[in-house]
Every structure is written in structure tokens, then in C-alpha cells.
Image (cartoon, helix red, strand yellow):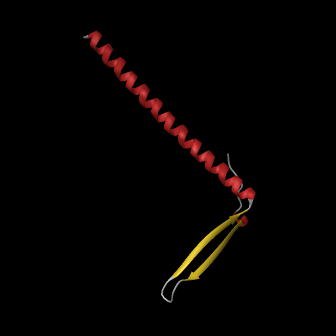
């Protein structure tokens, strides 16, 4: 699923505080519109779900491979 997240709804605010003559501390805040936040949250959820499915596929394949090797070992034992 693709989302149309336009980046023009993001507002950056940079606040700089002078602590002393040698040091400056800057804090950046990101403000987004509610639609943009919702869109990014959905996209994150889709990516997490895709990775979970990938891990599940890998585990199932590993389990099936172990079962196959076990059955093959048993078949070879019977044949010998």
C-alpha cells in the first residue's frame, strides 16, 4: 500500500540558546499536521508488518528444512 505523504506539511523550528560565549545549544522541534502524522504512522505499521511476515517465513522454512532432514536421515537409515 502506498501513501501520498507530502512533505510540505512539516514545519521545523530551530531554537538556539546561548549558554556562554563559547557554547551554543540548539533544539529542533518538528511540527506536523495530523494527516501527515497519521500517514507516517500507517507507513511505519506497514513496514513493521512486512518485516514480521519476513521473519515468520524464515522460521517456517527453517522448521520445514529441519523436518525434511530428519525424515531423510530416517529414510536412509531404513534403506541401509
Query: Does residue 25 lie above or below 4 as drawn?
Result: below
Q: In this view, which residue lies farthest toward the front?
A: 19
Who is closer to the viewer here, 28 or 42? 28
Residue plotted at (53% across, 83% down): 19
Q: Is residue 27 left or right of residue 67?
A: right
Residue plotted at (43% across, 25% down): 64
Residue plotted at (63% across, 69% down): 29
The quadrant of the image that shows the C terminus is top left
Percent of width and height locating residue 38: 71, 53
Q: In this view, which residue lies farthest toward the left?
A: 80
Q: Quadrant of residue 71?
A: top left
Query: Does residue 53 lie above or below 79 as drawn?
Result: below
Q: In this view, which residue lies farthest toward the bottom?
A: 21
Percent of width and height locating residue 74: 32, 15
Q: Is residue 80 left or right of residue 71?
A: left
Percent of width and height locating residue 70: 35, 20
Residue plotted at (64% across, 50% down): 43
Amino acid at each position: 500500500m502506498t501513501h501520498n505523504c507530502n512533505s510540505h506539511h512539516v514545519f521545523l523550528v530551530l531554537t538556539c540558546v546561548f549558554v556562554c560565549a563559547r557554547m551554543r545549544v540548539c533544539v529542533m522541534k518538528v511540527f506536523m499536521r495530523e494527516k501527515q502524522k497519521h500517514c507516517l504512522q500507517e507507513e511505519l505499521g506497514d513496514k513493521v508488518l512486512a518485516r514480521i511476515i519476513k521473519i515468520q517465513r524464515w522460521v517456517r522454512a527453517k522448521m520445514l528444512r529441519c523436518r525434511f532432514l530428519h525424515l531423510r536421515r530416517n529414510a536412509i537409515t531404513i534403506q541401509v
